[in-house]
Image (tube, rainbow, N blue to C red):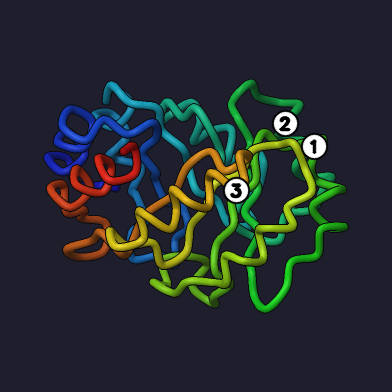
């Protein structure tokens, strides 16, 4: 999210748990620094999406934009995650880019240092691909730690997501993006309202 009226409508009409801000310069949804004044004052928890960023910049974005979480979407090392976690009280979410398989051993090393995982479809664009991975891979999720689901989610997926949450109670929620966009960074508020109602049936 980054359009002022669109963000305000989301916060007051859809009222999601989180609103995402992308701080990856190569993304068409990149949020500029000059937007921080009004974004930081929005009455909603904000998560900043980072891709292989320096810890100093992450901490600066937390302060400037009033972030409540960081979503680490690159190839961040365990050491970097530990460093950022020790330097801030906001939540740390580690994105796992899923191809044909999931290496649970890799996640095991990260698990003590993150607040939740987020599973997204592997893509060169680092998210926002509109493509879905095989959600059946999550049936073997071995941790008690909660996770988020992303990757090609559209309004038609609500029943499948509800069913998945019954089978895997660690599923905390979904991260939606391109499936609800009018243009990059501009969300379809009415479609999000409908989707939310379908999810919480």
Residue 73 at x, y percent in the picture:
59, 56
Instruction: Choose the circle earlier in sequence order: 3 or 2.
Output: 2
Q: Residue at (34%, 44%) from the top-left corner?
A: 199
On the image, numbered disc 3 is attached to which residue?
Answer: 167
The residue closer to the viewer here, 187 or 162, is 162
Q: Position of residue 143 (x, y in %)?
A: 77, 43
User: Element at badge 1?
Assistant: helix
Residue at 48%, 26% in the rendered image: 63
The tag on residue 36 is: none
Q: Residue at x 76, y 26 (%)?
A: 86
Along the polypeptide, which appears first: circle 1 or circle 3? 1
The CA span between labels 2 and 1 is 5 Å
Residue 100 image position (x, y, % from top left): 68, 78
Q: Secondary structure at mark 3?
A: helix
What residue is pinned by disc 1?
82
Q: Is residue 40 above or below residue 96?
A: above
Q: Distance from label 1 to label 3 (Cα)?
A: 31 Å
Q: CA distance from mark 3 to mark 2?
A: 30 Å
Q: Image quadrant for the C terminus?
A: top left
Q: Are marks 2 and 1 in contact (CB under 8 Å)?
A: yes
Q: Which mark is residue 85?
A: 2
């Amino acid at each position: 999210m980054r359009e002022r009226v669109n963000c305000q409508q989301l916060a007051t009409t859809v009222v999601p748990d989180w609103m995402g801000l992308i701080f990856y310069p190569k993304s068409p949804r990149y949020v500029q620094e000059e937007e921080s004044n009004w974004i930081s004052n929005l009455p909603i928890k904000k998560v900043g999406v980072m891709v292989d960023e320096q810890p100093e910049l992450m901490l600066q974005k937390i302060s400037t934009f009033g972030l409540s979480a960081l979503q680490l979407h690159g190839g961040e090392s365990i050491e970097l995650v530990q460093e950022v976690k020790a330097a801030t009280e906001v939540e740390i979410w580690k994105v796992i880019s899923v191809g044909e398989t999931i290496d649970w051993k890799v996640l095991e090393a990260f698990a003590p240092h993150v607040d939740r995982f987020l599973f997204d479809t592997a893509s060169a664009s680092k998210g926002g691909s509109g493509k879905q991975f095989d959600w059946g891979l999550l049936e073997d999720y071995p941790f008690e730690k909660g996770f988020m689901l992303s990757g090609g989610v559209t309004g038609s997926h609500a029943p499948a997501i509800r069913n998945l949450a019954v089978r895997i109670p660690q599923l905390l929620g979904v991260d939606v993006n391109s499936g609800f966009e009018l243009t990059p960074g501009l969300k379809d508020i009415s479609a999000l309202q409908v989707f939310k109602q379908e999810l919480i049936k």
